[in-house]
Amino acid sequence: MRKLKFYIAALSVALCCIFFGQQAGITADAAGGKYYLGGMTAGFMLGAGGAEIIDLSEVNAEDGMRRPAEEAGLKAGDCICAADGVKIKTIKDLNDALARCEGKEVTLTVKRNGECAEVRVLPAKEKKSGKYKIGVLIRDTLSGIGTVTFIDKETGRFGALGHKVADEGNNLLEISDSKVYLCSIVGVNKGTRGKAGELRGLFLNDKAIARAEKVCSTGLYGKFENYDYSRCTTIDVAPLAEATIGKAVIYSTIDGTCPQAYEIAIAKVDEGNRENKNFVIKVTDEKLIEETGGIVQGMSGSPIVQNGKLIGAVTHVFINDPTRGYGIGIEKMIGE
C-alpha cells in the first residue's frame, strides 16, 4: 500500500473529513442550516481500481531468470483492470487469474494514462513456489489523510478537499471500493518558504465510517454511514457573492481529533475564477503559524467561515509563503 498524494497544480494540500464539537464557536442550531460543519481529519483508503504496477521484477523460473511483464511491454504506473475478461480489483484477483492460466498466455486489460489496451503476457512458473508469475510488484490500495468540508444533514453525503485527488503523475484517480476512517493527528511537519509542510496522522480503527464514491476537479465526495452526529455543529452556507475582503476563520485539526477555529484574512474574492481559486487567504492566527507554519498538506478541505456562514474551503498553499493560500467557493463543492 502506498501513501496517496493529493495534488493540484504544482502544489498540494492533502485532504479529508469528519465532525466536531461545540467548542468551535458557531451556534449549533443556526437557523435553516442544512449542513454539518467539517474541519476534522479522516483517513481515506482508496481502491486503485485494479492492480497497479509499481515496479517490474525478475521471475526465477524453472528455465532461468525471466521478465514476462517487461517482455510484454508493461510499465510501472500501468493498472491491470482485467485478465482474460475477468475484472481485477485486488492483488489476490490477479494471483488467482495467473493460477487459472496454468502457464498459458493471458490477455491483460491495462489502463495507461487514462487509456485502455490489451496486452498478452506469458507467465513464468516460479521455481521455488511453483506459482505462475509475470514479474511485477503491485498495489491495489492507496491511502492518505485530509479534511472534510461539510456533511449534508439529510443525506449524510460529504464533500472534502476542494481540489482533485491525483496520483504521483498528477493524473485524476478513478476510485473504487473506497472507505473513510477515523484519524488522529499525531504530529506536524511545519511548512517553510519553498517547502510544503504536512500533517501526520494515524487511522484509529479498522471500521469505516463513510464511503468515498467520487473524485473530480472540486474534491472528493461520498456518504457517511452509521455515524453519530450528536457532536456535529450545524451551519448555514453563503454564496461567493456574500464573501468580502476581511476577517474570517478556518476550521482545522492539527492535533488529535478535534478541530479548532483559526483566524485568517480574506485578501481577494474572485467569483469567476475557473481554477477554483475563488479566494486568496492569509493565516493571521499566531498559534496556527507557530504550530504549522501556516497551511500544510492535510488541511485542504478546511472550511472557511465568515459572518457565521460556510463560504468555502482551503485548497492550496503558496509555495513561497505557507501563511498564504487559495480557497474554493462552497457552492462549487455543494453542486457536486
Image (tube, rainbow, N blue to C red):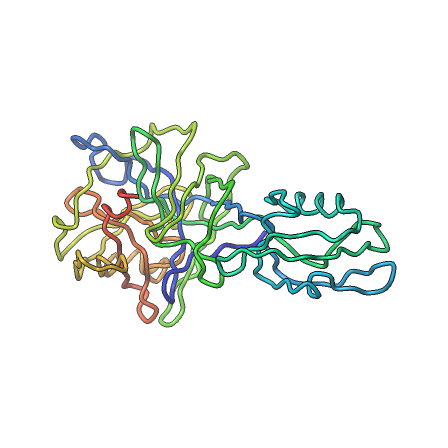
Point 42% across, 53% down: residue: 165
Q: Nearer the viewer, residue 274 or 263?
A: 274
Q: Is residue 144 left or right of residue 95?
A: left
Q: Which residue is at a point 37% across and 50% down the rendered structure image?
A: 216
- Residue 136 sits in quarter: bottom right
Q: x, y percentage for residue 75?
A: 61, 64
Q: Is residue 62 left or right of residue 321?
A: right
Q: Position of residue 229 (x, y in %)?
A: 35, 29
Residue 323 placement (x, y as % from top left): 29, 63
- Locate residue 122: give its quadrant: bottom right
Q: Which image quarter holds the C terminus?
A: top left
Q: Is residue 190 above or below residue 155?
A: below
How many numbered circles are shown? 0
Q: Residue at x 35, y 35 (%)?
A: 157
230 versus 137 height, above or below = above
Is residue 186 visible to the viewer in this orientation of the structure? no
Front residue of this view, candidates 121 and 305: 121
Residue 127 placed where, x, y %? Answer: 86, 55
Q: Is residue 219 visible?
A: yes
Looking at this view, is 301 or 284 the one in front?
301
